[in-house]
Image: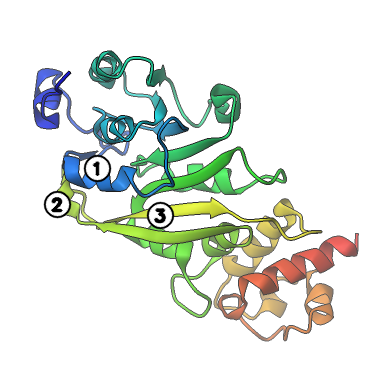
Amino acid sequence: MSLPPLREVIATHGLSASKALGQNFLLDEQLLDRIAAIPDYIAGKPVLEIGPGPGGLTRALLRAGARVTAIERDSRCIPALAELQEAFPGQLRVVEGDALSIDQPELMGEPFAVASNLPYNIGTLLFTRWMGGEAWPPPWTSLTLMFQQEVAQRIVANPGTGAYGRLAVLAQWRAAPRLAMKVHRSAFTPPPKVMSAMIHVEPRPAPEGVSAKMLERLTEAAFGQRRKMLRQSLKNLPGALDALVECGIDSTRRAETLLVEDFVAVTRAMGARR
């Protein structure tokens, strides 16, 4: 079954990107196919997509052979997605609802990849949820996600750079994120005011003896006052200053000078003291 162009689908169903829902539609099918090719071989594999909208990336994932579960909050987009279900029998499941309130592992029922042009207004929140929690490895096998380029750069940032902060540490301490592709604002309808980028993340073994919750508290305190020395920013976090001494880290340093491994070591030392 041949599919109509995405612009025609949008016109037929009277769709327009909702600013309130953080929507920006991607219509370039060649670009979408390139995005669908970023994850490892996905033919026959379960893939979760958040916010498919009119189904541009969904088409590309289905063409690549993935078994897609798409969570869409905007009821206006459901008829367009239903047409994709007909075109790819047995390959697409559409769930109408809010991705923030759905138990994704329970919904999927097996390990799954995530591939999404994320709604900008919930992208960072979803990402920190996927990266958080004590259970590791996670239920997802990889994340292939569209972010505003500024956010993407914060995820892959190196120590000592202006973009390096809490998001980089939380993304890198037990996973390997990389900037997979930059996407020009003109590729979207409507064009956003900022450039975008695709991030690809694969989980790595988690360091032993490190609490994810404690690491989150440590980075929140350290980067919450990033212009201040660690002895000032961490003074109200029990055990943190003693852990710095134990790890041989000078408390006059600032958070952005510490490696991800330094934050892991301090968190482990804090946990050992409890």
Q: Secondary structure at mark 3?
A: strand
Label ID, residue 50: none
The amino acid marked with disc number 3 is Ile
User: Crowding at label 2, few (<14), some or many (≥20) Cα neighbours within 10 Å?
Assistant: few
Label ID, residue 32: 1
* Residue at figure coordinates x 55%, y 23% from the top left: 107
Q: Is residue 46 left or right of residue 270?
A: left
Disc 3 marks which residue? 199
Pinpoint residue 250: horizontal percent, then vertical percent: 72, 86
Disc 2 marks which residue? 186
Q: Nearer the viewer, residue 120 or 58?
A: 58
* Residue at figure coordinates x 37%, y 24% from the top left: 73
Instruction: Point out the tag, 2 or 3, that comes first from the N-terminus.
Output: 2
Marks 1,2: beta carbons within 8 A: no
- For residue 131, say whether it is visible: yes
Q: Nearer the viewer, residue 119 or 69?
A: 69
Question: How far is the residue under mark 2 from the one under mark 3?
Answer: 19 Å
The amino acid marked with disc number 2 is Ser
Q: Nearer the viewer, residue 165 or 188?
A: 188
Pinpoint residue 226: horizontal percent, then vertical percent: 56, 73
Instruction: Point out the tag, 1 or 2, that comes first from the N-terminus.
Output: 1
Question: How far is the residue under mark 1 from the one under mark 2?
Answer: 14 Å
User: Crowding at label 3, few (<14), some or many (≥20) Cα neighbours within 10 Å?
Assistant: many
Instruction: Point out the tag, 3 or 1, that comes first from the N-terminus.
Output: 1
Pinpoint residue 144: horizontal percent, then vertical percent: 41, 47
Q: Quadrant of the N terminus?
A: top left
Which callout, 1 or 2, points to the residue nearer the camera? 1
Q: Is residue 41 above or below residue 201?
A: above
Q: Secondary structure at mark 2?
A: helix
Image mark count: 3
Marks 3,1: beta carbons within 8 A: no
Q: Is residue 224 above or below residue 41?
A: below
